Image: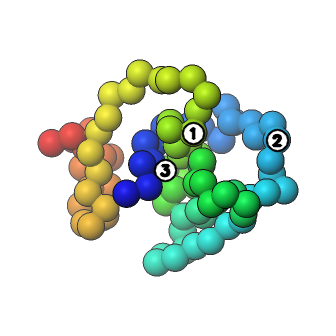
Amino acid sequence: MTGYVHINIPHEKFELLTGREALASYRFGTGAAEHLFCRHCGVKSFYQPRSHPGCWSVNANCLDEHVELEVEKFDGRDWAAAKAKLDAGQAGS
């Protein structure tokens, strides 16, 4: 419902240029993921997902320019099974 379209970017290829002071953080469930959002407007532009601990997940809908993406579905209700499929290269099946 938030319109989040994930683009996983390795930590070493991501640089936040501005706005760090406006970020707030929260964790829930296992606490493994760190969810970041703007404390002023509430937009969640990127976060640290538990599924990809070496990457930031950037919301494609927050980018200034459109990016062509191949979208793979991920069943968050059955996270462990979906992660196993992702690791096996079968995320879209």
Looking at marks 1 and 2 on the same chain, the residue that comes earlier in the sequence is marked by 2
Q: Quadrant of residue 9?
A: top right
CA distance separating discs 1 and 2: 14 Å
Q: Secondary structure at mark 3?
A: loop
Place of residue 32 in the rendered image (x, y in percent of width and height, measured from the top left): 54, 68
Q: Mark 3 or 2, which is nearer the eye?
A: 2
Say whether residue 2 is left or right of residue 19: left
* 40 or 16: nearer the viewer: 40
Mark toward the start of the polypeptide (3 vs 2): 2
Q: Which mark is residue 62?
A: 1
Residue 73 or residue 53, whichever sits in front: 73
**Which residue is disc 2 drawn over?**
18
Say which residue label 3 marks: 52
Q: Residues within 10 Å of mark 1 (few under 14, many from 20)?
A: some
Q: Nearer the viewer, residue 5 or 86?
A: 5
Residue at the far left in the pictured view:
93
Relative to 20, residue 5 above or below: above
Q: Nearer the viewer, mark 1 or mark 3?
A: 1
Badge 2: residue crowd in 10 Å (few <14, some 14–19, many ≥20) = few
Can residue 84 be seen in this snapshot? Answer: no
Three-letter amino acid code of the residue under disc 2? Thr
Is residue 71 rendered to the left or right of residue 32? left
Q: Secondary structure at mark 2?
A: loop
Residue in the picture at 31% in, 61% down: 76
67 over 79 or under it: above or below: above
SS at mark 1 in the image: helix
Cα separation between marks 1 and 3: 20 Å
Quarter of the image with the C terminus in it? top left
Q: Residue at x 52, y 76 (%)?
A: 28
> Mark 3 or mark 1, which is nearer the start of the sequence?
3
Which residue type carries mark 3? His
